[in-house]
Image: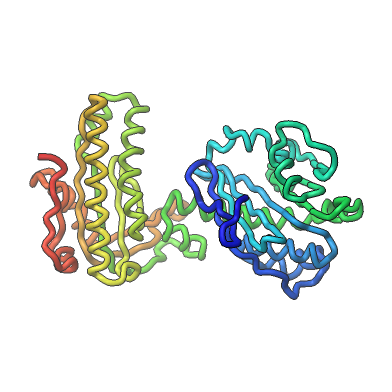
Amino acid sequence: SRFRNGRPAHGPAPGPVTVSVKPSQGRSAAPNDPMAWLLGSGRHIASPAEFFDQFCWVLIASGVPLWRASVHMQVLHPQLRGFAYRWWRDRACLEEIVGKHGIEQTAAFRDSPLRPVMATGAVVRHRVGGPALGSGVVLLRELQEQGATDYLAMPLTFSSGRHQAITFTTDREGGFGEDEITRLLQLAPLTLIFEVHATRFMMATLLNTYIGRKAGTQVLEGRVRRGSGEHIQAVILVADLRGFTALSDRLPSEQVLDVLNRVFDLIVTPIHAEGGEVLKFLGDGLLAIFSVEACGGNSGAAECALKVAAAIMAGLDELNVQRCTERFDRIELGIGLHLGPVFFGNVGAEDRLDFTALGPAVNLAFRLEALTKRIGSPIIVSGEFAGAYGRHASPRPICS
């Protein structure tokens, strides 16, 4: 990797892989026995990045001549295939790597020495400091050019039977000793700890994806009893597509799903960007809230919500221009905005709960959205919302 001002130059970038860099915490006062550390203080570290950073320094303290190490885990996620941490001794940094779906189509993935590890659970070792490596092993050649002498990759086999991988590289002349290889291969508790970290990550990811960020956090914190929740002041945003039933009757289901996904993308992206919480999708619409506390007051929440509504309409304009070019029907949308108290929490049956927002303020937001059809304006706000916003707002219709 190229460096700029002493730090790697390859930060987050578009494409199937993004890399973020954080400085290593350096050597700690942890014991120099890796097994004792794993079974003791190491397993209590909540952050997987911090855990891996400290684990590498413990290995060095125990006499393992570690220069570079990485751990790779596949996850269940609608956008991500997996994530990895890559540690460097001489650079004193830890890189967090996120791989999106599609990374498996890249040459780096296809040629990776990790493929047999994650596919079959094989242990792979390459003495990269020896004779020239064969073609197709790009990573190993790069490590060799940077001074590496020995590379070990071994599986972390989770209880599901799926293989993850961890790698160790040294720059010591002569590579790893056989006793060091044996010690690394015998670090069985490492698999259990990384499985816990991976499970936590997947739980948080799936909860945030399916029930929302704030709701997912509350579930992970143990707020899972029916009726549990909190009363909050919030701006409520209700959005709904126009004429979608007729559209879905005319189009094949694949095209209907494509329209919905494209519209929800342009709605949800600005909501999340402004700190809002999407509570649920309602067929061809959705319900979202902007917490007054999180947005810095009534006026802040109203400003965020109106900014989102304007961004949604601008995005819809662009989508309709594209659809007109493609000779498809235009899409129209109605938005209702209201500010008021809501109950945000669990509701449902004993064995099937949902996180939602309830109360008269939510009902009013839905009625405002319904009025957009009769009045002919794509955005309607309540008097409470307008009073909080404090400025004259005249959202434009999406077309003349």
Task: Identify which residue, 188 or 318, lies in the foreground.
Answer: 318
- Residue at figure coordinates x 55%, y 55% from the top left: 20
Left or right of residue 47: residue 316: left
Left or right of residue 188: residue 288: left
Q: Is residue 200 visible?
A: no
Task: Identify which residue, 298 or 97, lies in the foreground.
Answer: 97
Q: Is residue 55 visible?
A: yes
Vertical relation: 176 (above or below) 326: below
**Occupied quadrant, residue 284:** top left
- Residue at figure coordinates x 44%, y 49% from the top left: 210
In the image, residue 310 lies at what x, y percent?
Answer: 22, 51
Left or right of residue 382: residue 26: right
Task: Identify which residue, 133 or 5, lies in the foreground.
Answer: 5
Number of numbered labels in the structure image: 0
In the image, residue 339 lies at what x, y percent?
Answer: 22, 64
Task: Identify which residue, 319 or 45, lies in the foreground.
Answer: 319
In the image, residue 337 lies at what x, y percent?
Answer: 20, 57
